[in-house]
Amino acid sequence: GQNIDQPTEMTATEGAIVQINCTYQTSGFNGLFWYQQHAGEAPTFLSYNVLDGLEEKGRFSSFLSRSKGYSYLLLKELQMKDSASYLCAVRGYNTDKLIFGTGTRLQVFP
Amino acid sequence: EAQVTQNPRYLITVTGKKLTVTCSQNMNHEYMSWYRQDPGLGLRQIYYSMNVEVTDKGDVPEGYKVSRKEKRNFPLILESPSPNQTSLYFCASSPLDVGEQYFGPGTRLTVT
């Protein structure tokens, strides 16, 4: 079967750093993706990892360990506008489907 | 402006009354997909299409139909809607890499 786990909710303070974890068990692996979704809006693409290691994009970084079935999204210098849900999604090998986790709702406080 | 559009944005209907939610993209993407989003369940894929006349079932296809007669359009059809299809629906499109998907604004459907 396929399963993706993320924490349901997290809180953090403006200016801080937060790490959102994602673990997965899938039949094969061909990439892991992070999306951001503000309340009442559509998801927007943040990052993509297919090889082990860290991908950095401005204040956001994403890490992947395929052997551990583990990824995290790191958000630095948090801003109030970062309050949103963060969705982890995995593509299995030789498939065109994306399986999404249930998302992590992040609240940033002043 | 590059975008994915959906219509209608909001719809309240009754059980059994056929409806269609349209989806259109102007980015010449090959891949298009429909998702539903429910509290506690996340985004679940209904159907997807890799190109014109090519469609495949996602994880929750029961009660839905799709068609892909043109590259830009991918309508979602509910032949006989039921209350358990009350949900928030998103259409998405993607170029060759199906991971980086561009989502439409969503359609909130209520079936009474």
Image (spheres, helix red, strand yellow):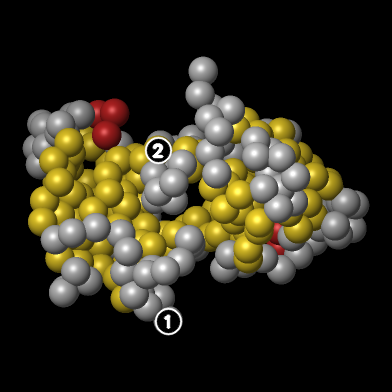
Q: First in sequence: mark 1 or mark 2?
A: 1
Residues behind callouts 1 and 2 on a single chain: yes
Label 2 Cα crowd, 10 Å radius (few <14 / some 14-19 / many 20+): some
| Amino acid type, label 2 | Thr
Return the mark for residue B81.
none
Task: Kindly identify which residue carries mark 1.
Answer: A1
- Which residue is at the front of the view, B59 or B15? B59
Residue at 83% across, 47% down: B19
Label 1 chain ID:
A
- Which residue is at the front of the view, B19 or A33? A33
Residue A47 is situated, as x and y percent measured from the top left of the image, at 27, 44
Residue B86 is situated, as x and y percent measured from the top left of the image, at 69, 54
Left or right: residue A91 compared with residue A53:
right
Task: Kindly identify which residue carries mark 2.
Answer: A44
Residue at 10% across, 56% down: A53
| Amino acid type, label 1 | Gly
- Which residue is at the front of the view, A5 or B55? B55
Label 1 Cα crowd, 10 Å radius (few <14 / some 14-19 / many 20+): few
